Image (spheres, rainbow, N blue to C red):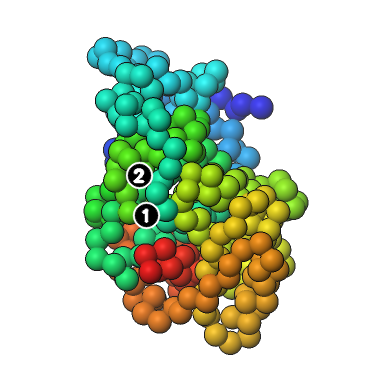
Amino acid sequence: MIRVREGVAAEVRAEWPGARELLVQMDGQEVRALAYTDTVGTPEPGDRVILNATALLQGLGTGGYALVTAVPDRLPADPPPQPGHLVKARYTPAQTTVLGVDEQDSPDHEALRDADSIDGMPVVVADLHSAVPAILAGARAVRDDPRIAYVMTDGGALPVAFSRTVHGLREAGWLAATITVGQAYGGDREAVTLHSGLLAARHVVGADLVVVAQGPGNLGTGTRWGFSGVVAGEAVNATATLGGRPIGSLRVSEGDRRERHYGVSHHSLTAYGRVALAPAEIPVPELGGEFGERVREQAGVLAGRHTLVDVPCDGMLDALRESPVRLSTMGRGLDDDAAAFLSAAAAGRLAVC
């Protein structure tokens, strides 16, 4: 199951908070590797490194990285004593303890102990991590400087440090905070569940708007139920349970010619049409033309349970081009698949209207 390799760090290619990208000599070839510095320390050129090369050798979608699991000749120092006993990535060799925003040692424990409502706060739910910057662009095109929190679920990458998108959005001031929930970790705040993460976004971060999506690395099997984004429907339920305003962003693509993803993806139709038991607003982007009619028709199957809202896309391309991070979904950029990003931006626009 695991393909373990040994290598030697040759070059530091890039780094951002919590992560360092390396070139590593492994099995006579040079490969890209990623080290989570809070977990394994900070590898330097010349260091011997132990790698989990499983996904790399199998050609899976991990960004093309081998993952550094240890720097055996220079182990990281123990962190200073600090509060926090939530264990994430539990019972794996990489398990880590964090301070949960809702646990007893947290200064925010009292604010959350009896919290039971997010007071009508809009929550935009998306299937893919790549939708996050587009949702923010759509919201910011309507309202100046909204206070937005990103709640990252554990369907994709568990360490938020894997996402350069989150780092770029935080640096640009587009995100007020990231809250990692479930087994995901490394956010500005840590929470046990999606419910407590949403409550923290409202009562601790003071967010006007929350975006819920998995981390990078969507998992799909080409079956109706075997994809990690199915939890988008559960996020709608959690939002409604806590008295929020759920908004279901449609996964749309004109660039993906696979029948199950062309137009409105079956992921959205399953998550919102079968899993979401509470009603939500479903923004339908006004894309125009034959493709726009296809999207409208496909989204129509959700009308029995949810409220479909036509959202104009005028000005949205300009807003998307102002994103401080690169827009990319399944390897396609804005010019390759504008519909994907316009659909997400429409959700952001609706949320602040």
* Label 1 Cα neighbours within 10 Å, binned few <14 / some 14-19 / many ≥20: many
- The residue depicted at 53 percent of the width and 72 percent of the height is 309
- The residue depicted at 39 percent of the width and 75 percent of the height is 316
Numbered disc total? 2
State the image coordinates of residue 222 (x, y, percent, origin top left): 73, 53
What residue sits right under mark 1 in the picture?
209
What residue sits right under mark 2 in the picture?
202
Relative side of 14 to 159, left or right: left
* Label 2 Cα neighbours within 10 Å, binned few <14 / some 14-19 / many ≥20: many
In this orientation, which residue lies closer to the viewer: 277 or 310?
Answer: 277
In the structure shown, which secondary structural element does the residue marked by tag 1 occupy?
strand
The correct choice, above or below, for 200 with respect to 283 in the image is above
Name the quarter where the N terminus is drawn.
top right
Q: Does residue 173 show up? A: yes
Precedes in sequence: disc 2 or disc 1: 2
The correct choice, above or below, for 175 with respect to 158 in the image is below
In this orientation, which residue lies closer to the viewer: 122 or 299?
Answer: 122
- The residue depicted at 29 percent of the width and 46 percent of the height is 206
The correct choice, above or below, for 234 with respect to 272 in the image is above
Q: Does residue 331 show up? A: no
In the structure shown, which secondary structural element does the residue marked by tag 2 occupy?
helix
State the image coordinates of residue 83 (x, y, percent, origin top left): 30, 17
Report how far apart the C-alphas of labels 2 and 1 lie in the structure.
9 Å
In this orientation, which residue lies closer to the viewer: 142 or 165?
Answer: 142
Name the quarter where the C terminus is drawn.
bottom left
Q: Amino acid at mark 2?
A: Arg
- The residue depicted at 67 percent of the width and 76 percent of the height is 297
State the image coordinates of residue 301 (x, y, percent, origin top left): 70, 68
Q: Amino acid at mark 1?
A: Leu
State the image coordinates of residue 32 (x, y, percent, origin top left): 44, 40
Q: Which mark is residue 234?
A: none
Residue lying farthest bottom? 289
